[in-house]
Image: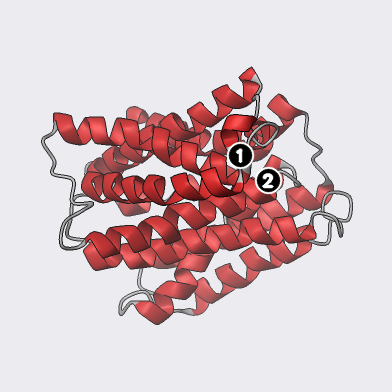
Amino acid sequence: MKQANFTDYFLLTLLSIIWASAFFNIKIATESFGPMTIAFLRAFFGSIPVLILCFYKKIFIEAFSKDWYWFMIIGIVNLVIPFFLISYGVKSVQSNLAAILMSTTPLSSTILGHFYTSNEKFNFIKTIGILVGFAGIVFLFSDNILIDQNNFLSALLILLGSTFYVVGGVLTLKISKKKNENVTGSILIWATLILFPLMCIFEMPWQIYPSIESSISVIYLGIVPTGIAWLLRFRILKKNGLIFQSQVSYLIPIFGIILGYIVLDELITDKVLISLFAVVIGIYFVRKADTKVII
């Protein structure tokens, strides 16, 4: 891969900020919309820039091809379930906590990769990284100021949502030979189709009168962190490779805490900072182990 330059690092930072901004926007969106509606609108608006790009580049969308069931399953596991769980959980916890909890995806993916792939096995450094990272999460749950008996389950649901993202990534390996834009567009189509009737049955959004702030946030969630960010991710992956792009994992929780404080004036406790540090260090060890052979 080409040596990264200033523009590459700028785009990596921009991607981190965009994904981090999703958390406080979800929080704002929950003031008016239910979690199923937020999930549907994220998938719907997120599909627009992806499908436009596919049309422009003449990339065939295979959502209803012979492999339709894979796109449907991945759409459910990688989009429908985590979008719903995260939206449901963020309603009761601070967005900065969600950013930290969601940043555990590299740790969870390492665990699943050990069992479901042939070339991503545990080694000493990876094990240390996983233990340190998840120790930070356990420590975060001991923060009685921000996580109590009223929102403990919500925090767990966010953590579960991050795990479904990882499972969806593993399932995507089944269709890894297909173009990223095609896969993303196809699973977004299926997520939209599945979420629409569920939204209508359980939440009936036509009966609500959303605020302007919530409406802007949910549209932003779809178009920017869900749609445009994925296209930006593809650009970085293509030019700089997976290892460079994976550095976004360090930055998302940091920017998530900063943005939550700036936009929503969210409380930052000592335990939040310690947990953040532990998670980032854990991710660092896991990523470091992937860049060289450990003897």
Name the one closer to the observer, 265 or 128: 265
For the residue carrying disc 1, how many other residues have a C-alpha within 10 Å: few (<14), some (14-19), or many (20+)?
Answer: many
The disc labelled 2 sits on which kind of residue? Val
Q: Which residue is mark 1?
A: 23
**Secondary structure beneath disc 1?**
helix
Horizontal arrangement in the rendering, residue 123 relative to residue 280 (left or right): left
Q: Residue at 55% x, 37% y: name it.
A: 22
Which quadrant: the C terminus?
bottom left
Q: Answer above or below: position of 96 versus 110.
A: above
In the drawing, what numbered circle is on residue 90?
A: 2
Q: Name above or below for residue 156 compared with residue 103.
A: below
Task: Specify whether 54 is left or right of 16.
Answer: left
Tell me where residue 209 appears, x and y as whole percent: 65, 24
Name which residue lies at 42% across and 58% down.
76
Q: Are marks 1 and 2 in contact (CB under 8 Å)?
A: yes
Q: What residue is at 76 percent from the left and 58 percent from the top?
A: 140
Q: Is residue 245 visible?
A: no
In this rendered view, identify the residue nearer to me: 219 or 178.
219
Q: Whole-percent x and y of residue 240? A: 28, 44
Q: Position of residue 53 (x, y in %)?
A: 22, 32
Q: Is residue 60 above or below residue 290?
A: above
Give the Cα distance between marks 1 and 2.
Answer: 8 Å
